[in-house]
Amino acid sequence: MVITQAKGHIRPDSVKISLTRRAAFAGVALLAAPSTALAVCVAPDGTHPIDELWTKRRELVRRSAPVSASYRTASKALPAWADSGHEYVRKSDGQVYGCRVFWSELESPLDAGDHFIVRPHPRQIKHWASNRPRAEYRAAMRDFVKRRRETIRIWDEAGLTALGEESQWLVNETSAVEHELVRQADSSPDIRAAAAHCIISLTYSFTGGDGFAVFDEGAAASR
């Protein structure tokens, strides 16, 4: 998932990042003590660049844990319409479907034949209204803008905007460190670089390959 960031400020219509990931037991075991995994092949002087990068990654992981916990707690207090949700609702059975998005749920969902569009993007509203009276388009956009403003206010008051910014920074920094670890592993014969690459690759395997994951190693170790 991608967070849209404008002028250093993340808004609720952006995609939320969760700093926790479901991990299989073996993946958690590796992440619980990655420094131990590397210690087998790290020289006593600790002068290799891999050491510094791995230490930085561990610190970022440590810092991510309280941010992740605070984000989850604050998110639970959101009204459902201001949190993420599915785009559509089928008329036949009321079942939600489609992508999970962060556009706020409209007070008056858009009637689209056999389903309702409950969380439309402005472009969807424009397309929906293309063969409808102009007044319907204006009403739908007023509904969208009203909900978006209310959502931004609620997120700011709950501290989620600030937490989202910090989460994004942590994910970006961790991603950069892991990319550099992998780059060095690809160009270095040093076994510690290969070990770091192996652990990171296993992390992706056990988290479904959804990008550079940030784990709470301390929590994983206590499980």
Image (cartoon, rainbow, N blue to C red):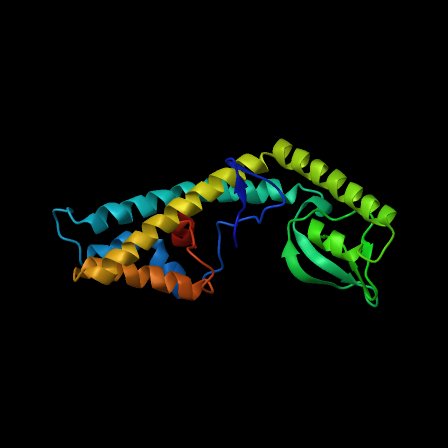
Q: Position of residue 26 (x, y in %)?
A: 38, 65
- Please tell me in which quadrant of the rendered image residue 88 appears: bottom right
Q: Position of residue 106 (x, y in %)?
A: 77, 48
For the question of whether residue 63 can be seen, the reply is yes
Please, is residue 18 above or below residue 99 in the view?
Answer: above
Please, is residue 40 above or below residue 219 in the view?
Answer: below
Q: Position of residue 220 (x, y in %)?
A: 41, 53
In the image shown, does 190 or 4 lie closer to the viewer? Answer: 4
Q: Position of residue 218 (x, y in %)?
A: 39, 48
Kindly give the residue lying farthest to the top in the view shown.
157
Image quadrant where one finds the C terminus:
bottom left
Specify whether 110 is left or right of 5.
right
Residue at 26%, 54% in the rendered image: 36
Specify whether 64 is left or right of 136.
left
For the question of whether residue 37 can be seen, the reply is no
Specify whether 172 is left or right of 15.
left
- Please tell me in which quadrant of the rendered image residue 75 appears: top right
Residue at 52%, 42% in the rendered image: 5
Residue at 33%, 53% in the rendered image: 178
Specify whether 32 is left or right of 16.
left
